[in-house]
Amino acid sequence: MSNEKILKKLSRRTFIRNTVIATAGTILIPSALTSCKKDNDDDDINYNGQGFYEGVASFDPSTDKVILWTRYTPAMEESTQPEILLDVAKDANFSNVVVSRKVKVDTGSDYTIHVDVSGLSSNTKYYYRFRSETTGAVSVTGETKTLPAAGQASEVKLAVVSCANFQAGLFNVYGAVANSDADVVVHLGDYIYEYGAGGYGTNGNTAGLNRTHKPAGEIITLENYRERYRQYRSDEQLQKAHQMKPFICVWDDHEVTNNTWKDGAENHQPNEGSFETRKLSAIQVWHEYLPARVTDNAKIYRNFEIAGLVNLMMLDTRIVGRDKQLSYGDYFTQTGLNTNAFLTAWTNPQRTILGQEQRNWLTGKISSSNLKWQVLGNQVLMGKMFMPAELLLITAQIAAGSPDPTLLTQYNTSVSQLVAIKTRMQQNDPTLTAAEKARIQTVLPYNLDSWDGYPVEREMIFAAANGKKLVSLAGDTHNAWYSDLKNNNGSKVGTEFATASVSSPGFEGIFGSNPATVTAFEQANQLLIEDLNYLNASQRGYLLVSFTNTDAKAEFRFVSTITTQNTNTTTGKTVTES
């Protein structure tokens, strides 16, 4: 089946989304006042196994709407489609109820429940719960909040997260986000990982923490993906984050498989069946567990205007339009890198990470917006990570897990020399030779899976944002970054704040966790990569980004461990851009 046909099929896949209009002072139906279990005309039944085991969640808040979610496991004795009630109130005791009505369980979508509640008041906290009259099961009480309209808030706080690998450790970061004062959680993808038990993310603590992936194999089928999401949503701290905060989500690659592009992926092999079918299954389950208010399930890019301050544009830089990533390996010959061939492919004006339709949507949204901050919810880094070319091959070999112990020595020697040369350049040392300068100035992008692999299209976005306050929020790399966004003329057009991961290993997984080694690596990169201002290469955490009419402030918050439960955080760096 062609890519076009598979996307059309996906677009036609619908989910039961109950639509509810909130009304102040809604009268509870009698059973809601008297009992959570209806009377049975026959003998009383002892129900077993029922519950809302995956917790509750809310998604895509607007000034008057929010999507409420849960999943219901029926009792073994329930032979018909379960009947579930939703209550929404302005207080935790449910004395000021605005909704109390039956909603449908989508039995064809893994017993998930999606309710799009409209008619709400802006900038208002709401409490909600789901319950079964039949079995008496009641969910935890969730909290959510609608977005403020223009003039209703002087500050907008977004918690930014990505890259949560269940096998890598505990989700302390989600617990910290639940306890934060963020208004909304922006999830930039890699909500799950597709690898099997013992695969990527596994470490010496995995078994002891009972974090081994289920199902045991790499997930490929519809039911595989559902079981993996259920496992992730069983996590106590992820449940708490969803219970306490509304989420705005996009996918990255691991919701399907590693290094996905529109027609394939690095981690999909011919013996694993049709990639299009796998992608269709993965995206279907994503919508079952992370519902988004979209009209086409294949197109999740959408924007949110918050408090008259922030135009948040959530992107899909992974699936809907991305051309296949370039690989340096395709351009190496016996004499080295075929630079001309690589540069021709790299600067091809037709190469796209967004696809034309999404690019036109994005440039239109930026150009037409008069809000103070134009904020991109990016899966991958937008800032330029151009490193000296001589480091590129060494770094790539180390990152690929090469066992050659001389590589690290070679890397350290090269970095030391390059740092010394760059320092002399900054000091305007007149004795620098042309050859030494060339070692610093001959640079190539490190990560071709990021925006660095699609430089022409990046310039188009920068041009659309000319004269506006542009901020890119990014994930994917597992490390924390703060960079200037500069166009090809070297002019600054914006700022990028990129979050560390929830649990997935960062550069410490490559270079080791020795503090001196990690610090030296961070400092060397900050010096040698022209647009990079800050890097944390070894800690897990999240970003708290606050927007006001005068500035954007990013706090890089980190947890101390993911091997024992501890949600306390420290702030590694605070940056303010005006």
Image (tube, grey):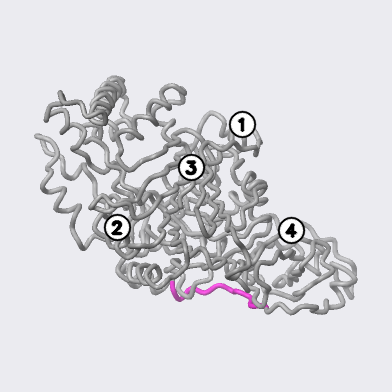
Q: Residues within 10 Å of mark 1 (few under 14, many from 20)?
A: few
Q: Quadrant of the N terminus?
A: bottom left
Number of marks: 4
Task: Tell whether label 1 touches label 3 (CB within 8 Å).
Answer: no
The image quadrant of residue 101 is bottom right
Q: Amino acid at mark 4?
A: Gly
> Which secondary structure, mark 1?
loop
Mark 4–mark 3 Cα distance, whole angstroms, equals: 34 Å
Q: What residue is disc 2 on?
A: 458
Q: What residue is disc 1 on?
A: 208
Q: Nearer the viewer, mark 4 or mark 2?
A: 2
Q: Amino acid at mark 3?
A: Ala
Residue 224 appears in view: no
Q: Amino acid at mark 2?
A: Arg
Picture residue at 48% right of the left edge, 42% below the top: 500
Q: Nearer the viewer, mark 1 or mark 2?
A: 2
- Position above or below: 45 against 491: below
> Which secondary structure, mark 4?
loop
Mark 1–mark 2 Cα distance, whole angstroms, equals: 44 Å
Earlier residue among tags 4 and 2: 4
Q: Residues within 10 Å of mark 4 (few under 14, many from 20)?
A: some
Q: What residue is disc 4 on?
A: 51
Q: Is residue 13 magenta?
A: yes
Residue 32 location (% of width, % of height): 84, 72
Tell me the magenta residue range: 11-20
Residue 526 location (% of width, % of height): 36, 35
> Which secondary structure, mark 3?
loop
Q: Amino acid at mark 1?
A: Gly
Q: Is residue 146 magenta?
A: no
